[in-house]
Image (spheres, rainbow, N blue to C red):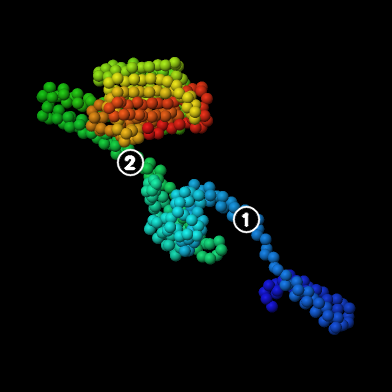
């Protein structure tokens, strides 16, 4: 008799009926053998016929189905790539982030078809054989250079067919870039301070020794020391300004200022130094006032840095102008432009001009008193003011720097209006 028939509910009912018949006969006090045999035969026939029917599988619990649906939804919304492979390293499941990172990733195909990194593949094999978790590094260069930490863990297969491996790829690209920027910043700042300090120490030792009684040399050396000390002062001031701006970069300013009045103030202040360098500054004020939400001190620093850059590196005729523009996405904007007719900037340098300590010509910039932080301060200040900076230049024809800020009181296009001043 098969297990299916032996465990059939029909046989269970037949056994109960046989027991009840035996009890009834015992209570009647007489034993009718033909009746008993006929009853038992009918019971056995009914149990056998009932056992021949198809056995219905127990319904799958609704809670299990719901848990699987929730797990799939969570996997789909995990922002980092997640891949599940079986003991043969065939892909069982992958979330959308993994498919976006590895377009050649397909179910039921080997992981090596899409991911060819030897360290990752060896790590998967090690986890499948030992069951112990591992961490390996993964670097990709196409289409972009990215760095991942791959965490590989062992999981039992849902059908009990063995062990599978789960790969979780954590993107470390931003953290590595931030770390590299921090290291570069410290190295650059140290280098910028070391040069004037070495100059000061050298001249102090000279004045204490061979030039002790040389009055003309002493006066010349003291002037050089004064210039180097001022250079260190400017560098420290710029570093402190940049730190303060970055500290408050996420807090939008609440004051209201007239950008036209600030621009005129800075044009008047920068006029005499510009004339001393052989440059002239012209100011074109349209139909003001040009009211923007902003911090007056920071916006003054933005305008000052743009005009100083135009005077130092452009020269000739400097034009400062204000206008309004209607951006279909960002709403009405106030645009400040600073243009020069200098030698211009090569296209390959323009995207990097707002990096800290980036200079096109290091020696020329230092000779003109530049710290390499002016445009970095402009960029972070405009980030706080929800502004934008663009720089356009043509070799031999000059450079134009434009600052765009949302006009105070004008309609904005919602969150899209919060534009960031990235590299030009």
Q: Quadrant of residue 290?
A: top left
Residue 292 or residue 45, whichever sits in front: 45
- Categorize mark 1 by other alpha carbons within 10 Å: few (<14), some (14-19), many (20+): few
Residue of label 1 = 65
Q: Quadrant of residue 151?
A: bottom left
Query: Residue 315 in the image: x percent, y percent?
Result: 27, 22
Residue 341 or residue 313, whichever sits in front: 341
Q: Quadrant of residue 159?
A: bottom right
Query: Residue 298 in the image: x percent, y percent?
Result: 40, 25
Q: Residue at x 83, y 80 (%)?
A: 38
Residue of label 2 = 183
Query: Residue 404 in the image: x percent, y percent?
Result: 42, 26
Q: Is residue 110 left or right of residue 24?
A: left
| Residue 409 against residue 24 in the figure, above or below | above
Residue 171 or residue 251, whichever sits in front: 171
* Residue 319 visible in the displayed image: yes
Q: How many numbered circles are shown?
A: 2
Callout 2: helix, strand or loop? Answer: helix
Callout 1: helix, strand or loop? Answer: helix
Looking at the figure, which quarter contains the N terminus? bottom right
Q: Earlier in the sequence, mark 2 or mark 1?
A: 1
Q: Residue at x 25, y 19 (%)?
A: 278
**Gap between marks 2 and 1 measured at Cα:** 51 Å
């Amino acid at each position: 008799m098969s297990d299916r028939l032996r465990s059939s509910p029909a046989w269970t009912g037949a056994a109960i009926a046989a027991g009840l018949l035996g009890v009834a006969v015992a209570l009647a006090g007489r034993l009718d053998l033909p009746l008993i045999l006929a009853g038992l035969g009918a019971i056995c026939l009914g149990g056998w016929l009932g056992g021949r029917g198809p056995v219905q599988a127990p319904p799958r619990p609704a809670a299990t189905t719901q848990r699987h649906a929730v797990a799939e939804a969570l996997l789909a919304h995990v922002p980092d790539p997640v891949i599940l492979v079986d003991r043969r390293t065939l892909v069982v499941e992958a979330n959308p982030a993994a498919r976006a990172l590895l377009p050649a990733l397909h179910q039921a195909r080997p992981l090596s078809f899409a991911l060819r990194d030897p360290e990752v593949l060896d790590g998967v094999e090690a986890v499948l054989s030992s069951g112990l978790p591992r961490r390996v590094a993964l670097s990709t260069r196409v289409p972009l250079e990215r760095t991942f930490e791959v965490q590989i863990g062992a999981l039992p297969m849902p059908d009990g067919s063995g062990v599978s491996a789960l790969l979780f790829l954590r993107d470390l690209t931003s953290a590595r870039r931030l770390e590299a920027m921090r290291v570069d910043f410290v190295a650059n700042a140290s280098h910028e301070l070391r040069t004037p300090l070495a100059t000061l120490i050298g001249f102090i030792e000279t004045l204490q020794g061979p030039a002790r009684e040389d009055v003309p040399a002493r006066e010349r050396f003291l002037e050089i020391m004064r210039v180097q000390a001022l250079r260190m002062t400017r560098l420290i001031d710029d570093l402190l300004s940049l730190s303060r701006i970055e500290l408050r970069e996420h807090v939008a300013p609440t004051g209201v200022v007239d950008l036209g009045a600030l621009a005129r103030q800075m044009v008047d202040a920068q006029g005499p130094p510009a004339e001393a360098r052989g440059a002239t500054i012209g100011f074109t004020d349209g139909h003001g006032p040009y009211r923007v939400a902003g911090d007056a001190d920071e916006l003054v620093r933005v305008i000052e840095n743009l005009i100083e850059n135009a005077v130092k590196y452009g020269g000739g005729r400097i034009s400062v102008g204000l206008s309004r523009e209607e951006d279909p996405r960002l709403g009405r904007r106030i645009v400040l432009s600073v243009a020069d007719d200098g030698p211009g900037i090569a296209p390959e340098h323009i995207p990097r001009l707002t990096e800290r300590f980036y200079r096109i010509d290091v020696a020329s910039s230092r000779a003109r008193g530049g710290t390499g932080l002016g445009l970095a301060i402009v960029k972070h200040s405009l980030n706080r003011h929800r502004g934008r900076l663009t720089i356009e230049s043509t070799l031999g024809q000059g450079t134009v720097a434009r600052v765009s800020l949302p006009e105070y009181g004008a309609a904005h296009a919602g969150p899209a209006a919060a534009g960031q001043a990235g590299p030009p």
